[in-house]
Image: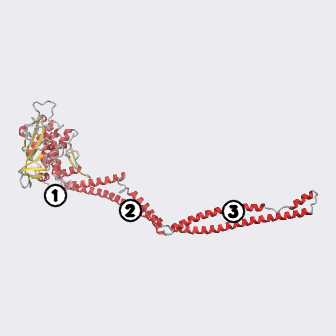
Amino acid sequence: MIRKIYSSLPSFKTIEFHQGLNLVLAEKGAQSSDGQTRNGAGKSSLLELINALLGSDLRKGNVLKSKELLEYRFGLEINFSDKHLIIERSGFSPSKIYVKSMPHQFLSASESGGESVVSNDEWLATLGTQMFNLTDSIRKVKSGPSFRSLFSYFARPVKGFDSPEKTFPMQSSCSVQVALTYLLKLNWEIARDFEDIRQKDKLIKALKKASNEGSLGGIIGSAPDLRTDILLKKARLAKHKKSLSEFRVLPEYQEKEARASEISKQLASLSAEDSTDKEWLAQLERALDNESEPDHKRVERLFAEAELDLPDLVVKRFDEVAAFHDSVIRNRKLHLQQEMDEISARVNQRFNEKQRLDNECSEILLLLKSHGALDQYMKLQGILSNLEAEVELLSKKLEATEDLDDKKADLKTERRNLQRQMRIDHAERDRAIADAVLTFADISSELYDESGKFIINPTDDGPKFEFDIPGKKSTGKTKMQIFCFDMTLMKLWGNENKRPDVLVHDSVMFDGVDERQIAKALIIGATMAEKYNFQYIVTMNSDDMPDMSSYPEFKLDKYRVDLDITDTESGGLFGLRF
């Protein structure tokens, strides 16, 4: 129970709290105009200060981190199990808790600059033990319940009044489920295990998405496509292996290949010479055919027709000429025949040479066909190695893809099993669930004509918490859902030896709420605080205080905290504006 909040800041207004309902009302200054606001009076800062003194992180923007307050200390007097503790904290040394008075069984403080100091982590461990019975083993569990995750439901930040199950808008499903199952006395470990499934599922979806987008195409892919690619690659691989096994290396392969090329050139040259000689032979054969014997009778007939008798001398001379001419013709024919014979001999010789070269070339080509060069063999070996590597890579990708698919299937099974465990746990803890459901209904029925519903649904994504008050679409009824749930938690923990015995509601809780419901809420809060022995701290503007004349037993002076805060420059909680 919080007894006192104070500060080394001279202008700070010390606050002393009492048992039961504590109303912190911000007044309007006597000289204030209608346009002035009391948003700077310190109502929300008081809530932030309480959380800071109870171990919250002092991040940038926290009230204690403001430059006007950084050097000052703020103190808290609090009771645990009838033990009085006093600690101080400053924004300048956020990790240190200065111990002013604390029993040794709570903390083991060290000396620093003549003062007793503990770390904020140790302070949180003490708070967790004293308020929620959090053991060391529980605190060590990753994503398990912590003091801050639990206490935030009893001193909600200003942004924590949007829904009953969340204490800040971006709170994760894991944080909500673990905290509420612990507070509702269900098996919080099952709720935490659902976070493992969510993380695995998130990873699988991310990998699938990455593979579809191509960024992980080298690691995973489509299993059917990969199987087809592997079959095709293996078929090519088998063919290359067979070719390589039948491959015979010919050391002088290049020499043989060069000789075959040379023979081809020689055969081409011989064929060209043959063409030339055969053309010349044809011309000679035509010339030989055109060479004919001289017709001596024609001359004799010419003279006879002229009725001339040739002298014997002329006849003798004519015979000699004819004989000479016959000799010339014979010699020419002989020359042509000789030349033709030479050409035929050359053609025949080339034919034999061509046949020899052709046989040699055929033998070489046959040898080259059945053998290969060493570099060709190495090239085939390289192709084979590449194919084997590709098949291996595809096999690894298929293995990774199938493993991912198996994990996805296993995850579904794991999720179903965990949901089954949760259903069993809810059945075994039916009494705890009934207490929470009936308490929420009872409290809401005191605010409205119809009671609200609090539903705990064991979904396949963990426990889902749903709240319903008829007509809850209005902002006011949404806020009253939070009020009813917070009061439900106070009752559920009311009989515990170690329990949170303080509940703080900022004025934001009552924004948009009908005046009649605010009045009823204050009555319920005061009644329950007295019945279950806890402290209910409420901040609001004085003119938002509802008319309580219908409740004569409600005495404002009994509940109002002796704290004068206004909307003036120096009238706020800290006595200065910043």
Crowd tier of the residue under label 2, counting other residues whose Cα lies within 10 Å: few below 14, some 14–19, many 20 or above: few
- Decide which of 248, 422 is in the foreground and name it: 248
> Looking at the rendered structure, which numbered label has been put on residue 188?
none
Query: Residue 436 location, x and y as percent?
Result: 16, 49
Percent across and percent down for residue 13 are 8, 40
**Which element type, helix, strand or loop, lies under badge 3?**
helix
In the image, what residue occupies the spot 9% across and 31% down?
A: 30
Q: Which residue does the numbered mark 3 point to in the structure image?
A: 278
Q: Quadrant of the C terminus?
A: top left
Q: Which residue is mark 1?
A: 137
The amino acid on which the numbered mark 3 sits, given as a three-letter code, is Lys
Instruction: Tell how many labels.
Output: 3
Residue 112 placement, left or right of 292: left
Residue 508 appearing in the image: yes
Q: Earlier in the sequence, mark 3 or mark 2?
A: 3
In front: label 3 or label 2 = 3
Mark 3 neighbour density, 10 Å: few (under 14) some (14–19) many (20 or more): some
The foreground one among 211 and 317 is 317
> In the image, is 214 to the left or to the right of 50?
right
Amino acid marked by disc 2: Glu
Query: Residue 262: x, y in percent?
Result: 57, 65
Q: Amino acid at mark 1?
A: Ser
Disc 3 to disc 2: CB gap under 8 Å? no
Residue situated furthest front in the rendering: 313
- Which comes before the other along the chain, label 1 or label 3? 1
Q: Which residue is mark 2?
A: 392
4 over 205 or under it: above or below = above
